[in-house]
Image (cartoon, rainbow, N blue to C red):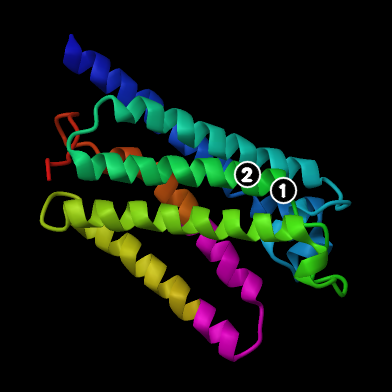
Amino acid sequence: MVTERHDLTLRIASALAIIAAVAYCSWPLGYALNPQVSRRGLASELAALHQPFNWVFIWLDVLAGVLVIAAVELLWRGAKGRLQRVVLANFALFGLLTAIDALVPMSCEPSLTQCPSLSHQPLLIVHGIASIAASLCLFASAVLVWWLKRKRRGGTIMSAFMAGWILFGALSLYFLVRPGPGYLAQHYYITLCSVWTAALPFMLATRSGHAAGVTH
């Protein structure tokens, strides 16, 4: 009975994470709703103030954040070991910071106009801090799961995720040195984060349905 309840909880948490991942990966909608920004700017600019359909991108990110937190609440009950709880804490922070980031949208679009200095855009600082912190928390969750799985079932998949983040770092450095369509690297990164968001509940579970963490 306990095992059945745990399996149901895991399935619900996994479904929430998958929906959150789809909502978070909203950049393809930009090519239909706001192609002017999508073809030159960053995904955050789609949610900027005064942009058409900005509310779609804002609320999709908020939805993603809320669903991630809900998934963590369910997964927390079956977490095994301190390290696995640290993974879930970082995942929850990613959800919270993503929602905050979305609710404090950019007030200026760098790809379309000359923006004022940061001293004249205090909310942009909050937006940037929340966005960077969310990315770091999600990356930390992936690194920790990779550490848990490195010599176990699922280790190869986690190594592929780590390679994906390394590739993003290489692309970012390339576009930093050689100006180009840097937004493509961001699209790749958002897609990678979305795939990891959907995969995390599965990677924390073993074949038997019990959590895969060990006590440290």
Q: Are marks 2 and 1 in contact (CB under 8 Å)?
A: yes
93, above or below 76, in the image: below
Amino acid tagged 1 = Val
In screen coordinates, is 152 left or right of 21?
left
- Magenta span has 15? no
Residue identified by numbered label 1: 104
Q: Quadrant of residue 161?
A: bottom left
Amino acid tagged 2 = Ile
User: What x and y, as percent, mark residue 112?
Assistant: 85, 70
In screen coordinates, is 32 left or right of 171?
right
User: What x and y, as percent, mark residue 67?
Assistant: 51, 32
The residue sitting at 18% across, 13% down in the picture is 2
Question: Which mark is on residue 100?
Answer: 2
What range of the chain is rendered magenta?
172-192
The residue sitting at 58% across, 83% down in the picture is 175
54, above or below 77, in the image: below
Majority SS type along the magenta span: helix
In screen coordinates, is 159 left or right of 179?
left
| Quadrant into which the C terminus falls | top left
Nearest the viewer among 100 and 122 is 122
Nearest the viewer among 103 and 149 is 103
